[in-house]
Image (cartoon, rainbow, N blue to C red):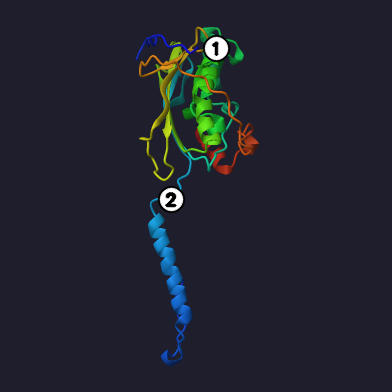
Amino acid sequence: MAYTSKKPALDSDRKTDNKIIAPSFYDRRASTAVQLKQQQLMNSFAENAFVIQRKTEVKNTGQSYNYEEGSVTVGKKMEAWLDPNDNQQGQSANLNTSQDDMMDAIRGRWDITGGDVVKGHLLNDNLGGKALNNNLYPITRGANKDHLGYAENAVKARVWKDNLGMYYEVNVQGTPHIDENVAYFDCVFKEWDTTQPGNTSGTTVLGPITVFSNLESVRDTGMVWNTDDSSMDVERTKPPKKPKNIKPKTKVSELNKTERNDRMMDM
């Protein structure tokens, strides 16, 4: 059963034919047929000009996380327009090394062992999320499981199983500082008409819901509630069958040139 009690408080809130032919010998039948075909194509294009299939698009916003040794960029907000016909290949968080010092500092400050706190994807790697700083935020093991079970699996099911376009948004609430033990991950996703780029006004399928992460109770699960304060329990979703072409990259050698450049800029 999902946790639906009161939300904990934050400590801080045509090519042209130029050939010349004498008019008396010019047979226009072929030319007329070509022109007719071209006109038909142009008419068809005009009729479909506003129903061009869009592609998956992701926008990330970062913020600075402060700790003893300095600061590093972490995720603040993620927006994704997910086209079921344009699945993107994501990246395992293990590819990110820029946040390693921060993660070590967090484990030391809160006496946490290994994988009980991880670099959590705002956009899941199986949905195309990259291992870049602005898509990762430290999250507890328990909260990461909740994010997967209550939000990410539901998005995957709509995109992979139902073949629907989805708009998915995650906002991180909380102070990005090593002395702050809590963080909230506000999640919502809506139906997205893939012919409308940038549209965020579709029918809400899930959310807004909040996933709660607490560095003082790293293995707690079920800390999820409806952000709109409704009394309805949030349901956990079973993982859908993964398409064969979905395989996040786990090695630097697998990255293409653009991804390598993005990674270098992120360090």
Crowdedness near tag 2: few (<14), some (14–19) or many (≥20) residues, C-alpha within 10 Å: few
Crowdedness near tag 1: few (<14), some (14–19) or many (≥20) residues, C-alpha within 10 Å: some
Residue at the spot 60% in from the left edge and 16% down from the top edge = 115
Task: Find disc 1 in the rendering and name its residue.
Answer: 107
Q: What residue type is labelled 1?
A: Arg
Is residue 65 visible in the rendered image? The answer is yes
Residue 20 located left or right of residue 104? left
Task: Find disc 2 in the rendering and name its residue.
Answer: 52
Q: In this view, does 28 lie above or below 249?
A: below
Residue 112 located left or right of residue 230? right
Residue at the spot 53% in from the left edge and 10% down from the top edge = 218
Helix, strand or loop for disc 2 = loop
Q: Residue 207: x percent and y percent?
A: 41, 24
Q: What residue type is labelled 2?
A: Ile
| Front in this rendered view, residue 43 or 220 | 43
| Front in this rendered view, residue 190 or 67 | 190
Residue furthest bottom as drawn: 24
Q: Residue 205: x percent and y percent?
A: 43, 29
Helix, strand or loop for disc 1 = helix
Q: Is residue 130 above or below residue 106?
A: below
Between marks 1 and 2, how big is the CA–CA gap? 48 Å
